[in-house]
Amino acid sequence: LGPALNKDYRGLWTEIWIPILSLFMLGTVITLMDAKVIVGLDLFRVAGGIVFFAWLQSMTNVDHKTQFLPDIMTLPLMWLGLAWSVLQPGLTTPALAVQGAIVGYMSLWTLNKAFWVLRRKQGMGGGDLKLAAAIGAWVGPFGALMTIGLSSFVAIGMAILLLIARKNFLKFAYGPSLAVAGVAVYLFQPFLLYAVHNVT
């Protein structure tokens, strides 16, 4: 999807390094699962994670270079997340997937409206809101909130890097920050739930 929608990409490595890293990290999770370090994780979640990460990587590449997230990329990812919650009885049930999509969208919508009231400017585009909804469908309502919270810190880090590199802030895309945070939440969600289960 990345190269098809974004013709000025430089090198195929920009499209495949994150899926490769995702495979490695998910393989690590499978190893820990086999060693009984974590429980409640199955191959459906692993396979879904590969699709989820690769899709986010393509959208990150497009958003970074075009400052635009097309509906053809965000909406299918959301519907796929909802469908995946039905196919696999994992950490995110169908009810939680729907709640996650709503929480993800409405959280950014509220922040965007608040920014408009304060500054009379749009803080982010509709594609960012739909991306948050898509991520929420994969990680549930609490995961959506964690993604949005973490993405703010990721965005600050990216802004600092742009400042150091003296890049133009007018072309700063928020989608990559959401994608990175969504990947982190998806990966560490089993560990967090396992820790909470042991504490309680």
Image (spheres, helix red, strand yellow):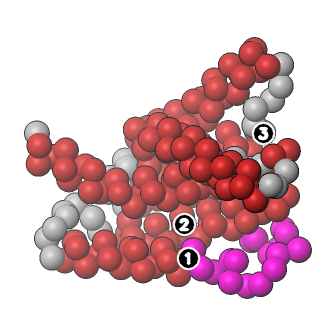
**Residue farthest top in this picture:** 117
* Labelled pair 1, 2 in contact (Cβ < 8 Å): yes
Inspect the image, locate mark 2, and give the three-letter code of the amino acid beneath it: Phe
Which element is circle 2 on? helix
Name the image quarter holding the N terminus. bottom right
Is tag 3's residue or tag 2's residue first in the polypeptide sequence? 2
Residue at (76, 59) in percent of width and height: 165
Q: Is residue 87 magenta?
A: no
Residue at (42, 80) in percent of width and height: 24
Residue 35 is left or right of residue 181, and the answer is: left
Q: In this figure, which residue is indicated by the disc labeled 3?
A: 125
Q: Is residue 12 magenta?
A: yes
Is tag 1's residue or tag 2's residue first in the polypeptide sequence? 1
Residue at (35, 57) in percent of width and height: 188
Viewer-closest of 164 and 69: 164
Q: Position of residue 139 (x, y in %)?
A: 44, 49
Q: Residues within 10 Å of mark 1 (few under 14, many from 20)?
A: many
Marks 3 and 1 sit apart, C-alpha to C-alpha, by 26 Å
Residue 152: mark: none
Q: Quadrant of residue 87?
A: bottom left
Inspect the image, locate mark 1, and give the three-letter code of the amino acid beneath it: Pro
Q: In this figure, which residue is indicated by the disc labeled 2?
A: 53
Q: In this figure, which residue is indicated by the disc labeled 1?
A: 19
Considering only vertical position in the picture, is 142 above or below 71?
A: above
Viewer-closest of 40 and 26: 26
Residues shaded magenta = 1-18
